[in-house]
Amino acid sequence: MSFLAKSLARVKPSPTIAVTTKAGELKAAGKDVIGLGAGEPDFDTPDHIKAAAIAAINAGKTKYTAPDGIVELKQAICDKLKRDNGLTYTTAQVSVGAGGKQTLYNALMATLNEGDEVIIPAPYWVSYPDMVLLAGGTPVTAPAKAENDYKLTADELEAAITPKTKWLIFNSPSNPTGAGYTRSELKALTDVLMKHPHVWVMSDDMYEFLAYDGFEFCTPAEVEPELYERTLTCNGVSKAYAMTGWRIGYAAGPVELISAMRKIQSQSTSNPCTISQWAAVEALNGTHDFVATNNVIFKRRRDLVVKALNAIEGITCPTPEGAFYVYPSIAGLIGKTSEAGTLIDTDEAFATALLEETGVAVVFGAAFGLSPCFRVSYATSDEALTEACARIQKFCAALT
Ligand SMILES: Cc1ncc(COP(=O)(O)O)c(C=O)c1O
């Protein structure tokens, strides 16, 4: 019998990290690799946020804090939720963790019993199903269609709900598709949830500020105020503020749930990094001017990639509303053979052949629960994206 816990057997290692590792190995071996796998902005953390962290260090703010965050940060989060989302929360309803990932995980750990189901619309962020499994629950995939720009419809949500459903995990704009739900599209889903009072919604708003073409972000508790009591509104500073390495995320919801999440965090990791918390106070309270500047660049890159990919026969790429990903379908390429003789029978085979034969690293769709597709992260330079798209085009043109 293995020394390791049985629960581990249910969980797979992150496929996005596997792609990054493979790309790194090829690079180290001297291959010219262009990585389009990264889930983080290529911009640096803004200077005023770094300065706040340095000031915190110099002021001796280097000790433990309350397990789920300093009150100054919780207040900044309450102010943000009021200002940007029209949601009223008190500091007792806020939990701060080491990244958005920890707060989502704490919430699942705090609520799931064996047999509890969690609906996860696909394509999904790779960590959702595994976090549900680690917490002892059962992930239920609800596939969204490419024709609907990868957004779940009311009927598809309704069909996934059972008496055992505990949560719907909602993510807009989405990783991996960039799809953002309009108010009416989200209202159609919240209307379904209103008919099923036993289902709660965990809204992962991580990409809220990364939206283009005037897309108006909305979140479930705001769209349907009657869902407030069974919504956990989750967000963080990682993506919009280019702070992935600082590890600060947060969630706001009913006091009983937030207290349970605090209990878990207090007996596992304790408080998120004190210095990062002070930096996050500045991120939330300080200027947001850089967001608009960065978004001009992200939008330009999105348009560049969508246009280049749609020009390739066999690839169809919707134009997403936000985040920094696109999710093209390669349905038109399945069954073909690459120049080096690899049969492209799955999106994993496509991504592997693309990396080995052209040096372009993308993540295959099966990792996100919807095939045959791949994810491109366009959080890299225009030059790298142009070159990568040219290589993808050449690779596809040579398929027979
Ligand atoms: C949809 C989504 N939620 C949450 C996270 C986690 O963010 P953090 O780095 O703050 O843990 C990510 C990171 O990739 C993400 O894509």
Image (tube, helix red, strand yellow):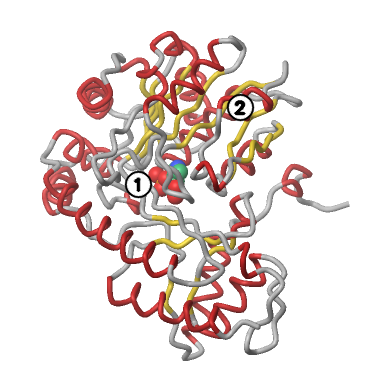
The residue that label 1 is drawn on is 322
Position of residue 281 relative to residue 50, above or below, is above
Q: Position of residue 111 (x, y in %)?
A: 60, 22
Secondary structure found at label 2:
helix
Q: Position of residue 10 (x, y in %)?
A: 74, 46
Looking at numbered disc 1 in the image, what kind of residue is underneath it? Gly
391 and 231: which is toward the camera: 391
Q: Is 114 positioned to the left or the right of 29 in the image?
A: right
Q: Quadrant of the C terminus?
A: bottom right
Q: Residue at x 72, y 20 (%)?
A: 162
* Residue 259 visible within the image: yes
> Farthest right residue?
1
Q: Quadrant of residue 346?
A: bottom right
Q: Are marks 1 and 2 in contact (CB under 8 Å)?
A: no
Position of residue 178 relative to residue 341, above or below, is above
Residue at mark 1 to residue at mark 2: CA–CA distance: 22 Å
Q: Residue at x 23, y 27 (%)?
A: 84
- Number of on-image labels: 2
The residue that label 2 is drawn on is 157
Q: Is 162 positioned to the left or the right of 226 in the image?
A: right
Position of residue 233 relative to residue 214, above or below, is above
Q: Is mark 1 within 8 Å of ligand 1?
A: no
Disc number placed over residue 215 in the picture, else none: none
* Residue 98 visible within the image: no
